[in-house]
Image (tube, helix red, strand yellow):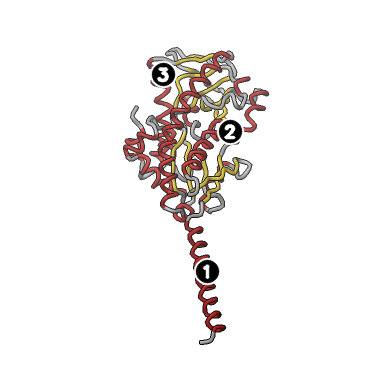
Amino acid sequence: MNQAKTRSIARTIRNGLLATALTSIAFAGQASAEETLKAISAFPQSLAFSQSFKGFVDLVNERGKGVIQINYAGGPEMFPPNQQVDAVRRGVIDMQYGPASYYLGTMPEADAWVGSTVTAAKARENGGFGIMQEAFSKKLGVNLLAHLDTGVQFYIYTINEPKRTEDGGIDLDGQRIRSQPIYNSFFEALGAIPVSVPVPDVYTGLERSTFDGSGWPIVGIQDLSWDKFLRYRIDPGFFQTDLAVVVNPAKWDSLSDEAKKVINEAAAEYEQTSYENFQKVIEETDKAVRENGMEVITLEGEAQAKFLDLAYDSAWKRMKDSGSEYYDALREAYYDR
């Protein structure tokens, strides 16, 4: 074999080895490439709830460097809040954070969280969370990752001082109270007239006295400046926040085991962290609204028990009447009052 031919064969071998090496490097890079999820929230980013979700995103991004990152893309400006889970189901968005009760018509099991009296951590321990994961998958076609920001209760706020009943209860007969589906039957049981008003329009409605009050969590009342008009709060609080983090099933299945592990561990941890964080926010908010002149009307004894019975019974009755096959198991897991 002449030298020219030998050099040609050597070049061919070297080029082949180089190509193989480059291909191997490329595949290795693909295998270890950082994966990304696009996420949205049902609320404007300025609200405390969206800021809490951002805390979860930051935790995943910190733990998942080089493995998994979440891109927090925005809120209602991306998709209307009550259409966001459908966008996740269709794969238009990978992840979403918002109220499960927006989908009560399709998934009545959301009322298990509305009427819950236990923390998310407790529900993970007793199997309730696993049942909810099955319901989310079966009814909404999405994977449930977390139940964040639990422990935040709802209250009835009014512009004017509400009347009292002879037994120490509250008389809302004929009062027009801004509501949403989870409150409606409870408010009606108190004699109030539920009024459906989108959140962005509530301020103007209060300013013009279009309605007499509103149901709302204790958190966020100042962020929205509603406390400028709502000068009375009826205690005790009732229900519990029902804020879910869901992900598209196909996208979830495509993630590496390492990425799934990062997200699942962060989800369980942040459920407890967000609970503790909001207990501090609740305390600070309560102090602030009182200092700013809001008067708190506290029901006691039998009047308080009757008030809470009407609230919680309305949520659990709604789920039972829906014929949910999960009713008994969810009530046992989520309700210990």
Q: Nearer the viewer, residue 153 or 204?
A: 153
Judged left or right of residue 43, residue 255 is left
Q: In this orientation, which residue lies closer to the viewer: 166 or 209?
A: 209
Between the residue at mark 3 and the residue at mark 1, the CA separation in whole angstroms equals 78 Å
Q: Which residue is mark 2?
A: 196
Local packing at callout 1 (Cα closer than 10 Å; few below 14, some 14-19, many 20+) is few
Residue occupying the point 37% across, 31% down: 118
Q: Secondary structure at mark 1?
A: helix
Asked if residue 38 is positioned above or below residue 4 in the image, the reply reads above
Q: Is residue 41 visible?
A: yes
Mark 2 or mark 1, which has the lower sequence index?
1
Tell me if mark 3 has few (under 14), some (14-19) or many (20+) residues whose alpha carbon lies within 10 angstroms of its own: some
Q: CA distance from mark 2 to mark 3?
A: 26 Å
For disc 2, the neighbor class at 10 Å (few under 14, some 14 to 19, many from 20) is some
Could you tell me residue 44's position as x and y percent?
A: 60, 36
Check disc 2 and report its element: helix, strand or loop: strand
Q: Residue 268, position in %: x, y?
A: 40, 39
For the residue pair 224 and 327, the one nearer the viewer reads as 224
Q: Is residue 261 left or right of residue 39?
A: left
Q: Residue at x 67, y 27 (%)?
A: 204
Amino acid type, residue under disc 1 in the picture: Leu
Please give the label number shown on residue 126: none
The residue that disc 1 covers is 18
Label 3 sits on what residue type? Gln
Among the two numbered marks 3 and 1 on one chain, the one whose residue lies closer to the N terminus: 1
Marks 2 and 1, how far apart in space?
68 Å
Q: From the image, tell me which residue sits under label 3.
A: 304
Is the Cβ of the residue at disc 2 closer than 8 Å to that at disc 3?
no
